[in-house]
Image (cartoon, rainbow, N blue to C red):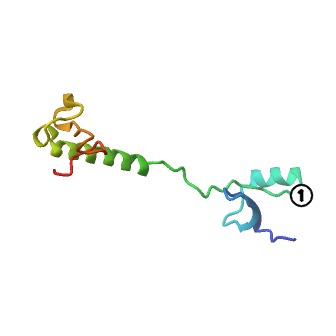
Amino acid sequence: MASAPDEIPIRVHSRRGGNMIHPVSLESAPPAAAAAAAAAESPNAVTYREVKHFKKWVPWLIPLFVVANIIMFIITMYVNNCPKNSISCVAGFLGRLSFQPFKENPLLGPSSTA
């Protein structure tokens, strides 16, 4: 396969596992020093460049959901106010954030009456 002088095959390492060579035309010629060094090594030298298709991913969505759920649970327990709405509470030292007993609420969370 003969390629035009303005096309350079580039090897792309994809995360999908397929390695393919794609010809890419250059908009500007390489610097004279680099071209001379490449010509000195081999007359038919092929230059490969690293192509990065993927940006570094910062995982923020799942921790955001976890924090939002914890905040909503605390707000719900505060509004529930077990000592005011129930005769006995589990973990009474938590005050308004204490839980109803298992007989009233087997899921150990806020009451259904709040």
Q: Is residue 63 left or right of residue 17?
A: left
Q: Is residue 77 left or right of residue 1?
A: left
Rendering coords of residue 114 (x, y %): 16, 50
Image quarter hosting the N terminus: bottom right
Q: Is residue 10 left or right of residue 63?
A: right
> As displayed, is residue 46 above or below residue 99?
below
* Residue 80 placement: quadrant: top left
Mark count:
1
* Residue 28 placement: quadrant: bottom right
Residue 68 vs residue 77, the one in the foreground = 77
Question: Circle 1 sits in a helix, a strand or a loop, which is it?
Answer: loop
Image point (81%, 50%), residue name? 37
Rendering coords of residue 6 (x, y %): 76, 68
Image point (31%, 44%), residue name? 70
> As displayed, is residue 110 above or below residue 12?
above
Residue 55 vs residue 60, the one in the foreground = 60
Rendering coords of residue 102 (x, y %): 27, 40
> As displayed, is residue 15 above or below residue 24?
above
Residue 100 vs residue 73, the one in the foreground = 100
Give the residue furthest to the left. Answer: 84
Rendering coords of residue 54 (x, y %): 58, 56
| Residue named by callout 1 | 43
